[in-house]
Amino acid sequence: MDDDVPLILTLDDSGSSTSAPLDDLDREELPNENGGSYDVINDASSPAAGDGCAQQSSTRHNWEMNYQEAAIYLQEGENNDKFFTHPKNAKALAAYLFAHNHLFYLMELSTALLLLLLSLCEAPAVPMFRLGIFVHATLELFALIVVVFELSMKMRWLGFQTFIRHKRTMVKTCVLFVQFIEAIVVLVRQTSHVRITRALRCIFLVDCRYCGAVRRNLRQIFQSLPPFIDILLLLLFFMVIFAILGFYLFSPNHSDPYFNTLENSLVNLFVLLTTSNFPDVMMPSYARNPWSCVFFIVYLSIELYFIMNLLLAVVFDTFNDIEKRKFKSLLLHKRTAIQHAYRLLITKQRPSGISFKHFEGLLRFYKPRMCARERYLTFKALNQSNTPLVSLKDFYNFYEVVGLKWKAKRNREHWFDDLPRTAFLIFKGINILVKSRVFQYTMYTVVAVNGIWILVETFMLQGGNFFSRNVPWSYIVFLTIYGVELLLKTTGLGPVEYLSSGWNLFDFSVTLFAFLGLMALAFNMEPFYFIVVLRPLQLLRLFKLKKRYRNVLDTMFELFPRMASLGLTLLIFYYCFAIVGMEFFAGVVYPNCCNTSTVADSYRWVNHTVGNKTIVEEGYYYLNNFDNILNSFVTLFELTVVNDWYIIMEGVTSQTTHWSRLYFMIFYIVTMVVMTIIVAFILDAFVFRMNYTRKNQDSEEDNGIVLEKEISKEEVVGVIELYKRTSPATETAQLQKIVLQMDKYGQMSMLFLGRRSRTKSDLSMKMYEEEIQEWYEEHSRKEESQMQLQEPASASNSSLKPLSLRQRSQTV
Amino acid sequence: MDDDVPLILTLDDSGSSTSAPLDDLDREELPNENGGSYDVINDASSPAAGDGCAQQSSTRHNWEMNYQEAAIYLQEGENNDKFFTHPKNAKALAAYLFAHNHLFYLMELSTALLLLLLSLCEAPAVPMFRLGIFVHATLELFALIVVVFELSMKMRWLGFQTFIRHKRTMVKTCVLFVQFIEAIVVLVRQTSHVRITRALRCIFLVDCRYCGAVRRNLRQIFQSLPPFIDILLLLLFFMVIFAILGFYLFSPNHSDPYFNTLENSLVNLFVLLTTSNFPDVMMPSYARNPWSCVFFIVYLSIELYFIMNLLLAVVFDTFNDIEKRKFKSLLLHKRTAIQHAYRLLITKQRPSGISFKHFEGLLRFYKPRMCARERYLTFKALNQSNTPLVSLKDFYNFYEVVGLKWKAKRNREHWFDDLPRTAFLIFKGINILVKSRVFQYTMYTVVAVNGIWILVETFMLQGGNFFSRNVPWSYIVFLTIYGVELLLKTTGLGPVEYLSSGWNLFDFSVTLFAFLGLMALAFNMEPFYFIVVLRPLQLLRLFKLKKRYRNVLDTMFELFPRMASLGLTLLIFYYCFAIVGMEFFAGVVYPNCCNTSTVADSYRWVNHTVGNKTIVEEGYYYLNNFDNILNSFVTLFELTVVNDWYIIMEGVTSQTTHWSRLYFMIFYIVTMVVMTIIVAFILDAFVFRMNYTRKNQDSEEDNGIVLEKEISKEEVVGVIELYKRTSPATETAQLQKIVLQMDKYGQMSMLFLGRRSRTKSDLSMKMYEEEIQEWYEEHSRKEESQMQLQEPASASNSSLKPLSLRQRSQTV
């Protein structure tokens, strides 16, 4: 393990013990103010106080450590990791670095997935994936050992104290322990016992670095719970009142099976809450006395139409509030991270800002993949004062700027500008054609006609066996038109520009699929036939026509990551319930299983033979079982949709005990929570977006964040000089190319465009613009008061002074 | 009709033709500044420019007209009536006054209700209410003639020009015309034809003055429609795509009845949108190939969980926006109304404000029921500058202040302060006891125990015939405790204070009901038994314990009027659909009617005789019919709840044509709109309220709007003097009483408290505080620019100068 420590040692040629315990404000570096606007690049690399070589390398080593620590601070700020998990010494740093790279993350993820997927092969297994008990138990043990290794790395990085204080990690450790014992027990006994604890395996997935969004969702769900539970109690309270009332009112009616006992009354009113049994539950009493419908109307009005909406309102409100608070705390956390990093990068001699040399050093650790050109452009973009130093105020924009992708702004407008005259004119013509409104609307018309055609065609087709038919000519015609359009657009706009628009990409892929479908059809490859039915997707292009749809679809794409993470969260809940369901209800439901229950019809499976015809009466509900994990997922989805869920519940209940209902009711409430949160999230996101659009109605079309920076030849040469002294030549290759290009076109400077897509955070920044200033002020006031409290203890230290790595590495 | 004109003539002793065409700024009235802070009361009543009696009465007449017109402006402002419907001459004014009082409103309402209720007795009538065709047609004609009378009054008031420009009135006239002809046709033919137009009768109700809230709701619904329809199209578009896809995928499976034709495919996916047929529609294909569940999961995820929520989001957003715009326009409208009224009340000599004399004159018309004391207090409350005049700025608060209920602030704290010493001490003790926390929590405990007791008791009771049993002792015990509590509270707090709290009122009525229930039980009056089952409502008191519940319940009570109007709006839609349903589907559904359809089971009604037992198999769905209006309403409610609605649809469809489905689908979409709006409304109201609470967390408990004003003896005497000269002695009786009371206690002044409950408008005022200032500025800027445009035409007139009644009355 100690092999991985080096990053800090390899850069240090004189060993970690050489440097004196220097505070970051005591750096032995003197100002180097010998003029020249870009000499700043060279300032720190040549110690002005003419010391020996050892001194220089020591300074350099210190700097490298500072760069690394600053980069770690910035990463922590970005990932919203609390600073108390900051590595405290060299060993911890090594572990930190080991545990913070994509290989490690992938290992984490794959172990977690392996553990989760094991349930495909365990006891009530999916037939296809069934494995021997020895095989899957060994696999499980292996995965658990990997988790142990991961946890030990984490402990090394956090230290024992922090490790046991970190709640999530502790829970994970406990779960790991239990799983380990159980896996060994299974291996020894060679049979599986009731392992409900398998439901806890999800925590390994939740704890993955890549599942941060899921963790955030879960946190949000738990934070929304208290008000949710309050309203839920109100709901249940009314349910109990109505159950008692219903029992008194309807139990004298002996043909009413729904209210004959208080328990039935309660259960049926719970189901009525989901409307699943609605007109049926009312019918026996309604048949006897028409006015009894009042009871049900009042119940539904209060419970379903009022309190359930209230639930949504309360969750939505909490959600809104949490979102804003989260944004605020994240913003302030990032700000603190930037302050920590800033303190590590300024020199004693020049405390007013960071020079490029140090900024570059930081970026080397923070974003190793960034090339020299981009690093310099980022520095330029941050530096708004035109001095050679980036001040703290400028540095606050670090996160907004560092994500930009830089590209030289081309003078050429089209890709064919360099072609010979004739070709240029042809392509220019195509370009104008393709961009014209007439062309666009013609295409819309074609798409609309195609849509109607498909509809009519399908309508005429019904009953016929359409699989064996030839390729319809209309299909070929429309496909040809789309093909020509695609060709024209690609040539007219150039492939790069064409594919840079999401809509064009969509057109392209749909046309491609349709073409593949045609091929499949021509060669009679049936499995590919489903591609043909994707044809109607072309019609989606029509939605470009209206602004609201563009807005909706854009928002949809923006929301997609969040939606996916919410879906994953839901799946995690599904997994837990599926495991529990499998342990208790696997195999209890089968055809004709529930003939004594009230839902017998739905489970019936009869083979009549009337005359010489066999009539099969199928209730099909026996298919909704917990026999393996895939079936369980489908069953749980059906429970989520809620309609007729009580048939599944009653079927299982009739085969087990009536306590089984608890499982289904709890599942209903849990999905209600998650679904309410999903609705609240969609509501929030769209309302936010629409408010934003309304606020910025006058501003131009939304193209993401764009920044423009000009750099002159001298600057580039200066940067190359700097790199030559410290780094291998490969780094400067791109910079050299820029110089060559400038020479070729005889330019003295070159324009670069930085671009990135707009995130929710950018929108929030704009929405809360005014409040943000208040937050900052409040934040700095708090810090000042904290500083004053610390003053007596350490009068000379700034409150922003981070715990320096180096100081502590000395003590180890 | 001309008999009703006088209000303006009776007050005018010299006839309407005597007064010169006076502009409201040219009033012949001179200042009367002979000192004395309350002489202002006398200023205008004695024309200082020593003219004759005729002159005086002319001035008085002019003033009366001004008061009346100002009062009308203020009413228009309050009711959000547009100013172009302002009565333009004396005749119009008479009609206006005739059409604007509660008697007329009640007539409007009762005619509308009569017309609506006729459908209880017409053709497919409720058996109990069946009337001969001659009777109900005559009743209808009578009601229609009353409507004609109402409309003619309206025409008289609005004038022909405005009348035909007013859309709602025009629609009403057309409907009236059609209904008239149809009623005559029915009378002549003596049989009813297909009268779908009866559905339009709702417009008579909607047009009632008392149904303003319903009109507002309808307007809001129509305003929310465009974005709603956009998203609906998106929904339908995906539905069509999936229908085609489903048809291709599942029609080869011959055991799948849901996708065998494109029409079936579409209908079933529409029903699936409501989840009503969910696991069933999937089952045949799922049984064949487990992976086909993906189709359904994707469809439901897109349509149900995404687009449907999007629908809510869009409606919610539009709703929010409309609410704010509505609030803004209402606010500005009120402001303009106040400006108009103000112009009519100031004198040329004192253009800086309104004196009490004129203010009192206004209030006499605006709120005839107000007593002299309250008028003076309202004036004092408005007047914040302590000068004898109310400036325009103060007058802007008119609507906020005029609703206050004034009460003298008592020096006595408790009702028993005047009692002899011993009695005082006893009651004081009770008072302290009742207000103590211990007492409150004891009562909560009792209620909780009672709740558990009821639950356990009911649980033990099951199966027994509980109607014939004796009164359970527990019931008597708990009722005694509640009775004692009620008694203690009433004596300790005094009946007035006790009943002024909503919660106490609730306790009181529940206890009273429970007592009545006990009586009913004791005397074996079964019909009253239902009161006994109201017992659990006592448990609602427990919700006082938690702040969130108090908030929720308070908001619920605040929302109640709006909710009721939304419910009424929904009922109006129900009515329209019920009429259409009755015309087309009355009598088509009966037991065993649909044996050929897929939903035959639900309509089956069979009498087996197995051995000596008769087994009745009832599907009951034949009860969900359109055989009369009450049945239709219940059926429509079931359709609103959505679950299993397709059984009703398919039942009706199997007996008629498959075009009947359109009726059900359109109904579904309409209720979806209304329900979404209801959800949006509840969401909006609660989120608004919670934001408000969050904003005002530090402020004290919400007790409505309270204002405190002190008036001195001199003032009261001054006011009495003023009244003595102009009005009968009865008006001053209360004021005299105040003077007597002051003399008795030897006070020189008396404190009064004005109180009213907080309305949504007050909350909005506070929420939009900052924006409101902007709106005002923008508004006055707009007015100024309008004034500048008008300048050339009428240089001397202020833009705020309303069209004076008097001027126009001269020309008639």
Image: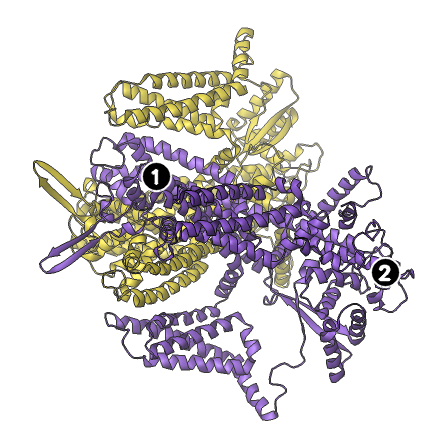
Chain colours: A yellow, B purple
Task: Looking at the image, tell me whether mark 1 or mark 2 is earlier in sequence order.
Answer: 2
Q: Is residue A454 left or right of residue A424?
A: left
What is the count of numbered marks? 2
In three-dimensional space, the C-alpha distance between marks 1 and 2, rounded to whole angstroms, equals: 74 Å
Q: Is residue A303 left or right of residue B245?
A: right
Give whichever of B399, A565 is nearer the camera: B399
Q: Report the chain holding disc 2.
A: B
The disc placed on residue B56 is: 2
Q: Amino acid at mark 2?
A: Gln
Q: As displayed, is residue A605 above or below residue B348? A: above
At mark 2, the secondary structure is: helix
Give whichever of B480, A553 is nearer the camera: B480
Give whichever of B28, A62 is nearer the camera: B28
Q: Are marks 1 and 2 on the same chain?
A: yes
- The answer to whether one can see residue A809 in this image is no
Which residue is pictured at 55% across the width and 37% down the height? A402
Which residue is denoted by mark 1 in the rendering?
B660
Q: Report the chain holding disc 1.
A: B
Residue A237 in the image: state x and y as whole percent. 39, 65
Q: Amino acid at mark 1?
A: Ser
Q: Going by the picture, which residue comes out furthest to the right? A: B50
Q: Going by the picture, which residue comes out furthest to the front? A: B188
Cβ atoms at labels 1 and 2 below 8 Å apart: no
Tell me which corner region of the image, top left, top right, bottom left or bottom right, holds residue A780: bottom right
Label 2: how many Cα within 10 Å (few below 14, some 14–19, many 20+) = some
Residue A207 in the image: state x and y as whole percent. 38, 49
Give whichever of A777, B739 is nearer the camera: B739
Residue B407 in the image: state x and y as whole percent. 66, 72
